[in-house]
Image: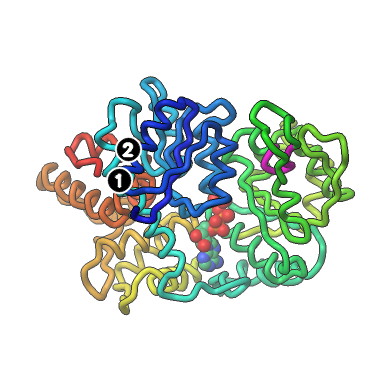
Amino acid sequence: MNGKSLLIIDDEKKLCDLLARILELEGYTVYKAYTGKEGLALLQQHNIAVVLCDVKLPDYSGIDLVALIKQQKPQVEIINLTAYGTIADSVKAMKNGAYDYITKGDDNDKIIPLVAKAFEAADKNATSKTSQLPLPKGFDAIIGQSTPLLEAITMAKKVAPTEATVLLLGETGTGKEVFATAIHQASKYATSTLMAINCSAIGADLLESELFGYKKGAFTGALQDKKGLLEQADGGTLFLDEIGDMPLHMQAKILRVLEDGTFIKLGDLQTKKVNVRLIAATHKNLLEEVEKGNFREDLYYRLSVFTLHLPKLNDRNKDILLLAEYFIKRFSATAIKMSEDFQQALLKHNWKGNIRELKNTIERTLILNDSTILESNLLPATFNSSPANTNANLDMASIEVEHIKKVLQYTSGNKTETARLLGIGLATLYRKMEQYGIPKY
Ligand SMILES: Nc1ncnc2c1ncn2[C@@H]1O[C@H](COP(=O)(O)OP(=O)(O)OP(=O)(O)O)[C@@H](O)[C@H]1O
């Protein structure tokens, strides 16, 4: 036994048992589940680091399940098992954070090394949680000194100790979740938990059962009663990210929670009451969504009592270098400075992905960097307007190969993470790996 635990979720019992035997012989402790629900329950009960999961399960789509597992246990790595014809689904699942996928029957010899790699990545996830710098908490985690950001912080500090619902508006990567966490931590609800869910990441049915919970027998596969996030957050805060994507019928249920704290579990007849503070966020213009009929007007007015607008990074230029320095310290153990050119390139860039993009850019640059000074040539091509090396395509290709390999090594072969750091789509990464003959692991 190597003491490492994994979970196989597959409704094809024979295949599930066979895989379990193969992996047990490798020394893993293997848990088996034939439905998504059983799998989720086992994940809560045991210290499981890697999940092998069928893409098509009787009660869940594997794509939704990946998002859900990643949301509940971000350190866990998931390998999808696909049949021919469902590879497109697997690529979607990887976008939701799956580690990799493997074709059933065809790839048996690949399973063992892939599982070993996934365990390495899961270990890394677990340890990276405790990075060199102790992570600042609450409002201290919000880095920046620009006027629009300081104004947002002042407002957030005022509303935090109250019971008011807060609506956070801002483009992707502007720090809505960071603000929601800070508000929770500075509130009386901080003695209980902050539960968060992204309403756009999972399908409508799953979102409903995750939020409101269900009674045993409410639908096929509801084998036992399940508490929803609302109940789990009782006494604490529920953060509804991307609320603009919540289906209309669920908006009605959320409105009721806001009005009197009550809701009904799926398959239940009785009303439950909770004391939960709601924080919602969206990058959408909710008024426009109201006009289009996609968002309830009454919920909009209920939510927008206290609205906080988070500024785009380009509207807070003063913070770009401050944030860059902060991320350098977080990601690097040694003292590293930015050259003047590097700083200018950061200041001139159009940060469409806002702080998330800046954070990823710094992380990527540090991987490539071998010196104590970050130079602008380490930045992706979109940052440098200087004429590119026109010498030969071959050179560019070999640089690209080296770069992809370096990042793959850094992420222990995690393709989703690699694509994220490279700033390209997953399908593009796969295409490039195939084109350049870069081994999958
Ligand atoms: N002011 C800040 N100081 C330090 N880090 C920040 C700040 N704002 C955001 N970040 C970091 O940037 C990344 C994106 O932030 P966050 O997830 O809060 O954005 P978001 O607006 O919720 O994005 P999305 O709408 O895509 O969910 C996170 O890694 C977060 O830690």
Answer above or below: position of 326 versus 428.
below
Instruction: Specify the label residue 270 is tagged with.
Output: none
Near-viewer residue (53 or 209): 53
Mark 2: amino acid: Ile
Which residue was labeled with disc 2?
22
Q: Residues within 10 Å of mark 2 (few under 14, many from 20)?
A: some
Q: Residue at x 44, y 75 (%)?
A: 133
Identify the secondary structure beneath mark 2. Answer: helix
Relative side of 253 to 386, left or right: right
Q: Residue at x 58, y 75 (%)?
A: 140
Q: Residues within 10 Å of mark 1 (few under 14, many from 20)?
A: few
Relative side of 342 to 42, left or right: left
Q: From which residue to which does the magenta span run?
A: 209-214
Near-viewer residue (117 or 292): 117
Q: Residue at x 18, y 51 (%)?
A: 402
Measured Cα–Cα span from mark 2 to mark 1: 7 Å
**Residue 318: percent from the left, percent from the top?**
50, 71
Relative side of 226 to 84, left or right: right
Residue 184 seen in this snapshot? yes
Mark 1: amino acid: Glu
Residue 312 seen in this snapshot? no
Q: Verify whether residue 415 appears in magenta.
A: no
Q: Verify whether residue 211 appears in magenta.
A: yes
